[in-house]
Image (cartoon, grey):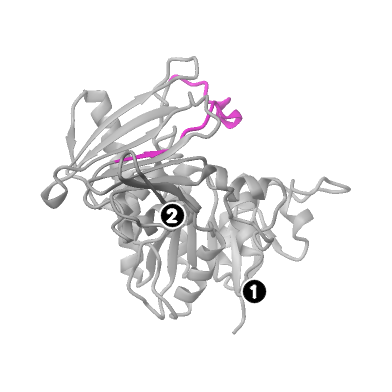
Amino acid sequence: MSPLRVGLMGYGFSTKSFHLPFILPNPDLEVYAFLQRKEAPAGKVEPGTHCTIDFPDAKHYRTPDEFFADDAIDLIIVCTQHDTHAEFAERALSAGKHVVVEKPFTVSTEEADRVIATAKKSGKVLTVYQSELLPTFSHATLLTINEDRRYDSDFLTLQKLAAKSAFGQITECEIHYDVDFPTWMSGWTSPDWSPGDGMLFGLGSHTIDQALLLFGKPKSVTGFYRSLRGIESKTDDSFTIILQYSGEQSNLIVTVKTSVVATMQYPLKYFVRGYDGTFIKYGEDVQESQSSKGMKATDTGYGVEESGTYGILTTKQKVDEGQKRDDASGKWIGPVPSTKGEYTKFYTDLVKAIHGEDELYVKPEQSRDGIRIIGLARESADKGCTISF
């Protein structure tokens, strides 16, 4: 079977760091075309500045109309500004392409509903770059939203422990994604805010998705957002979201947090507490940092976390081989080796779904629910009250 021909919209950091390194090793995908508005340079140019330099055999389009009109493109990846995601996703669906959309899915629930409706109307499948399951459609077109943090080593480890019922009934879960004043935030100087701006739409789209995958839809949302970067601004760089649940999970509280004040050797990632066990995890998945250092996804050790940041599991009964019984407390305590992170698996899974060989991995409705939580969190913070989901 011939490889799927991939067209990428944009040639910035996201395309080069979060997609191409995981597309190129896949023999079932061919980098076929780019949409980059910048004219192809003349003369000698540094690699990494233009698609025609790095991929001289690929087609180069400078306008969306020309790009979407290329019938040879099978799969489109949208790596453009947040406020263009919905428009380009709809156009790609209407052009009969498989589609990957970089996070966030959209900048509003209304946009998400519209894209989902377009996919259903056209008979195409809308999915998300995470790890939820959808029914298989063997002759459908696939739309995928980039939320690759479902393939992080630490989250895969947490899922594995939850599947073993290591915690018993979970009463509290904290999901953190802290960054200590990152350089890419230096341009956030406006006092105003527009949909799609800020950490809630940035890092929050990942951690909120993880909460939804683990626990489902909440009963209510309470949000707080702040600007800790030295200016008064409605554009959040730090936030806290409290999710409360109903029914069998009525005693569960989930906290999703990001802070740019993170003076720590290893930032806190997860704190999970249940009747039978507790899990504390520091540090970040290593795949992004490994890629930035030039390591390839196919290299030995890629996605493998060092033992110094393994999470610590404490339980009433032995769950993992790394645990030892603590005589003083009578509990089983020890580090849990992190599951290997695999961003490449997203594209492997996607190809299988396109060919009707396996189920799609993520429901777009869940990504839409994440966008809804972001909106409700900001509304909650502005009004100073808890908002029903």
Considering the image in quadrants, where does the C terminus appear? top left
What amino acid does circle 1 point to?
Answer: Pro
Q: Position of residue 74 (x, y in %)?
A: 55, 71
Q: Position of residue 319 (x, y in %)?
A: 35, 57
Q: Which residues are magenta?
A: 173-191
At label 1, counting other C-alpha atoms closer than 10 Å, the crowd grade (few under 14, some 14-19, many 20 or more) is few
What secondary structure prevails in the magenta region? loop
Give the residue drawn at x 50%, y 46%: 310
| Residue contact at pointers 2 and 1, CB within 8 angstroms | no
Give above or below for 138 relative to 206: below
Seen from the viewer's position, the closer of residues 171 and 12 is 171
Instruction: Determine if the magenta segment contains residue 236.
Output: no
SS at circle 2: helix
- Work out whether residue 191 can be spotted: yes
Can you tell which of label 2 and label 1 is closer to the viewer? Answer: 2
Mark 2 vs mark 1, CA separation in Å:
28 Å
- Nearer to me, 27 or 323: 323
Q: Is residue 300 above or below residue 327?
A: below
Is residue 187 highlighted in magenta? yes
Please state if 225 lies on the left or on the right of 216 as rendered: right
Residue drawn where x is 56% and y is 66% of the image: 69
Q: Which residue is mark 1?
A: 27
Q: What's the residue type where badge 2 is placed? A: Thr
Residue displayed at 27% across by 26% down: 381
Residue 102 visible in the shown view: no
Q: Which residue is mark 2?
A: 157
